[in-house]
Amino acid sequence: MPADLRSGPLTVPPNKYSLFKMRRSPQLALEFSPSWGGKRTDAGRKRVLPGKARVGHRARPEHKARHPVHVTLRAVAGLTSLRSPRVFPVVRDALAAASRQSFRVIHFSVQSDHMHLIVEAADKLALERGVLGLIIRVARRINGALGRKGAVWGDRYHARALKTPREVHDGIVYVLFNFKKHRAADRQRIDACSSAPWFDGFRDPLPRVLDPPPTWEPRTWLARTGWRRHGLIRFDEAPQPSPPR
């Protein structure tokens, strides 16, 4: 055995092994482009409907069964007119099939790229499920009629509760006479692409339509009786500007 190990504990000669520190290198400064951050051109979610504001992704408000609801659906840009002879009949049939006891379409109007509905629903869940089911049903019928695939609706549906007799009265005028807003030259008294032919609230009654109505009879007091406090609907009435979203 070596002498240094027999003489006692192993010792390390001083300075033979020493701790050392890494030499710090100078920190490099990060250079940022002057254009970094801030608003950028064409950033964000694209609009499907040019010139139309999107419906915000906010939580839907609570719904009370006594309030009819004005619902608006907008189609994607470039879709064949919803009023065309190929499309409107399937849209009307889909609307008729969408109603049930807890969700009812009571008035509607179909324009070239959007639809207006007045519906009744038992509660918030019935309203949401009813509208979503209607959206899917109508989209499938339209795609089938046109032999196409893909999205039909370009935005979330917009819904506004009608809480007073005046709001319901004006809502009916807005929906049934919406064609006057988009086709000012149209001199027809009523719109054939709406539920107006079956409506019994005109001041001058229309001839009775023998075909079964695609809508349900209203059950809420506001939609059945309350709105009549402001008078029956005249054929010379026109939609008022829609309220801001």
Image (cartoon, rainbow, N blue to C red):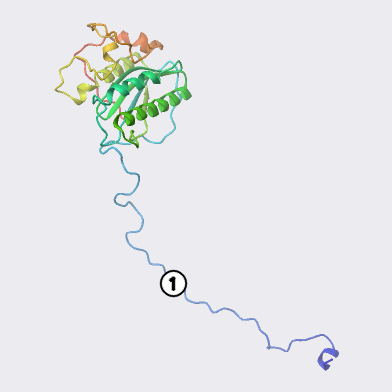
Q: Give the mark count.
A: 1
- Residue that appears at 43% across and 15% down: 66
Q: Is residue 114 left or right of residue 222?
A: left
Q: Position of residue 226 (x, y in %)?
A: 35, 10
Residue farthest bottom in this picture: 3
Q: Amino acid at mark 1?
A: Leu
**Above/below status of 32 relative to 156:** below
How packed mark 1 is, by other alpha carbons closer than 10 Å (few <14, some 14-19, many 20 or more), is few
**Above/below status of 228 relative to 125:** above
Asked which quadrant contains residue 237, the reply is top left
Q: Position of residue 234 (x, y in %)?
A: 22, 11
Q: Quadrant of the N terminus?
A: bottom right
Residue 162 appears anywhere in the view: no
Q: Quadrant of the C terminus?
A: top left
- Residue that appears at 49% across and 77% down: 25
Viewer-side residue, 17 vs 123: 123
Q: Secondary structure at mark 1?
A: loop
- Residue under label 1: 28
Q: Is residue 215 left or right of residue 21?
A: left
Q: Position of residue 79 (x, y in %)?
A: 27, 34
Residue 29 appears anywhere in the view: yes
Q: Position of residue 4 (x, y in %)?
A: 81, 92
Viewer-side residue, 164 vs 146: 146
Asked which quadrant contains residue 81, the reply is top left
- Residue that appears at 44% across and 72% down: 28
**Above/below status of 74 relative to 174:** below
